[in-house]
Amino acid sequence: MSVAVLLFFFGLLFTIIYSDSEKRFLTLIIGTIIFPNVALFTTNPSISPQHIILYVYFIVEFFKDRENFNRSIFFNILTIPILLNIISYFFTALYNSGIASKDMYYGIRDAIDCLGYIYAAYLYARHVGINNFAIKLIPFVYIMCFCGIAEVLLSDNIPYRMVCAAFPHYNGSFDLNSKVSLIESWRLRTFFTTKHPTAFGMLLMSLFLFYLPYLKKDALDRKKILFALILLSANLVLCGSRTALVCALLGVALLIFDRVGPFIKFLIAGIVVFSFSALFSFMLDNFQTSHAGKGSSLDFRERQLLFTMVSISNSPILGNGNKFTSHVIFAEDTRAQDNYGDDLGGLESVVFSLLIDRGFFGLFSYYLLLLWMFIVLFRHRKSPLISGGFALVAAGTVFVTLSGTIGNCSQFLFLLAGCQLGQIEKEKIDELEAEENPSLDDAKE
């Protein structure tokens, strides 16, 4: 089976190199999902199939469509917040280790791995648009969701084992020679070929909110979309990520809230406030303290926050260095602990890792990017193909704030939101071309 997985991987690379823009981007998304970042070709430097697919995609786009590549990179809707993030990576490395250092190398790699997916999606959608892509991705969504259901029925994640075992190095925590499952007695947990149920939850939530507005399309597509949404909803429950489920509901609520009249908005707000008040004590009981390791809790995150503030006490503005949390705090065979020796888990919030790595400047630039994306998509929410974009970014922002970016799960959010941002530019280009080249009928008039 390892040979089949490797053939599939090289087949994806062949498709990226020799196919058109639409197939290249579909291949990028499928490859990003199928190959988790714990499957590696080399460990030093760390090179995964995900990295190779992304880098090859950019190289091909550069040589095949230089004009679109240049305009997408230098005249992007997100140029200012992305530039600030790049500056943050640079000055963090410069302050902590100097320009010729591993810290600078880690910053470059991290910037590409994080921001590169926005650019890749923007490159595609600005040139082609997203309608056909969204429909053609649906069969893969079906397959992914059926695999999630099979994972529960078999209590074994066979796709994950097959994919990870095919590559020379594996950086995960499972024994690939036996059953791989995170299903517990008190909850179901699935993760397909992502690193963790949290990452799978981000993927499912992002796809759900991306496809939800497509229910307004024609009858044939509506049936496909509806079935996909049902499968995604089922898998959101099965993956066991409470954050993913809550954020998906938040996104749906935002979409509904945006579409109703003032009176209904007031009524919904009242219901939400009343419901939250009624459930507040229940939430405190279930989330304030840990119960026999049953998931993260508020007091757990409070200890993580205190650990974070102590960690950046000497460098609050620029942090301790790019990748400091993964290469120092969570170095191989170590776990982060507070002053009392208590385990601090994985610092379940992007706030903690950003503060430790890149300080308050890094935190500000990252959230500015998310806010910028939200504002742009909110302003264009009347466009049918991207009407749910603002809800997707809002839910994704809450998600990474609550549960972090385990398994680089933000790439799923950035791929889909980046598509929608590229669609905005595509529509602007189409309007300009229509004005410059009026139809024959218009010319006669």
Image: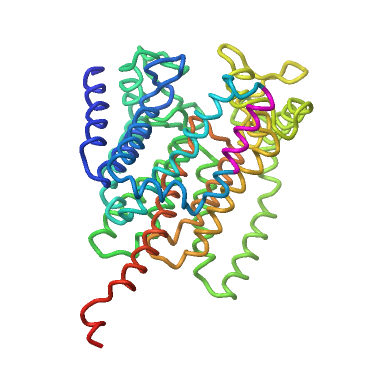
The answer, for residue 144, to whether it is visible in the render is no
Horizontal side of 62 relative to 209 (left or right) equals left
Q: How is the image coloured?
A: rainbow
Residue 175 quadrant = top left
Q: Is residue 146 magenta?
A: no
Residue, far bottom = 445
**Which corner quadrant holds the N terminus?**
top left
Horizontal side of 185 relative to 348 (left or right) equals left
Q: Which residues are magenta?
A: 84-96
The answer, for residue 202, to whether it is visible in the render is yes
Q: Nearer the viewer, residue 430 or 190?
A: 430
**Is residue 290 positioned above or below 212 on the image?**
above
Q: Residue at x 54, y 75 (%)?
A: 261
The percent coordinates of residue 149 (x first, y second) are 34, 36
The percent coordinates of residue 100 (x first, y second) are 58, 21
**Main SS type for the magenta part?**
helix
Horizontal side of 31 relative to 104 (left or right) equals left
Q: Residue at x 62, y 43 (%)?
A: 365
Residue 292 quadrant = top right
Q: Residue at x 59, y 75 (%)?
A: 263
Q: Nearer the viewer, residue 296 or 349?
A: 349
**Is residue 315 positioned above or below 257 on the image?**
above
**Which corner quadrant holds the C terminus?**
bottom left
**Is residue 173 positioned above or below 289 on the image?**
above
The percent coordinates of residue 293 (x first, y second) are 61, 25
The percent coordinates of residue 325 (x first, y second) are 62, 24
**Is residue 130 positioned above or below 188 on the image?**
below
Q: How many marks?
A: 0
